[in-house]
Image (cartoon, rainbow, N blue to C red):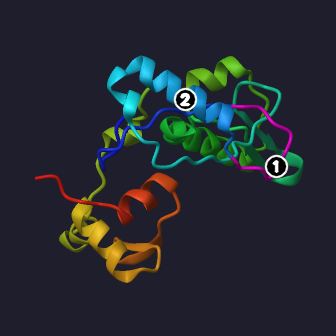
Amino acid sequence: WTTVYGNIIVGPTAVDQDSRTDRSTDAKTLQKLKEWGEKAIPALKDAVVIGSYSGLRPSCEHRDYQIKAFPETNWISVGAIRSTGLSAASGIGEYVFSLYESLGKNERMEVSNAEIENDLLGVSEAVMKPLEQSPDIVNLLKVPTLKDLASDFSTAKDGCVTLYGRRQRVTHPISYFGMGNFTECE
């Protein structure tokens, strides 16, 4: 895929490991990704790799999300959320909220995996109902252009950008790299 900065990204991979702290990349995996990229897009054969990054994805022995309420302790555990967690976040949030509401009603909390999967499918009703917003809030919520964000990032030199009136730290490796190396395409 291509980033908003015009870089071609090959990956990700998912490699099981026992360490909870090792975020290193290894030459063998990087070489496999380079070969795969060249096979998929032959023009990449002479491309220079400009960076790599890795992270740890917490998971467990089960392939599905592990979401469970514990009424006896008034606790809800949400874990083993993998790559699909971003696109499923709205549904996960709604499901967890329904568990939260149930805690107050002392309802039985156990549900099957099939029930969870059905609850997470599709777009929720909440997404279809736009929020009422005053003009002041609308102006505050305007998203800055990529050019403005990159300029802010490069000028301030503090690793942050201003979003919605607050300084926010840029933590994603691709965004950090892109913000620091942004050049506007004509």
Q: Position of residue 124 (x, y in %)?
A: 43, 34
Disc 2: CA contacts within 10 A as few (<14), some (14-19) or many (>=20): some
Locate residue 177: give its quadrant.
bottom left
Q: Residue at x 67, y 44 (%)?
A: 25
Asked whether the viewer can see residue 62, the reply is yes
Locate residue 82: give its quadrant.
top right
Left or right relative to 104: residue 51: left
Identify the residue at the far front of this view.
Answer: 46
Magenta span dominant secondary structure: loop
| Residue type of the residue flagged with mark 1 | Arg
Q: Position of residue 79 (x, y in %)?
A: 73, 42
- Between marks 2 and 1 in the image, the one whose residue lies nearer the viewer: 2
| Residue with the mark numbered 2 | 33
Locate residue 179: give its quadrant.
bottom left
Front one among 130 and 88: 88
Q: Is residue 117 above or below residue 139?
A: above
Front one among 40 and 87: 40
Q: Residue at x 52, y 32 (%)?
A: 11
Left or right relative to 158: residue 73: right
Disc number placed over residue 20 in the picture, else none: 1
Disc 1: CA contacts within 10 A as few (<14), some (14-19) or many (>=20): few
Q: Residue at x 18, y 70 (%)?
A: 135
What range is drawn magenta here? 15-24
Identify the residue at the far left of this view.
Answer: 186
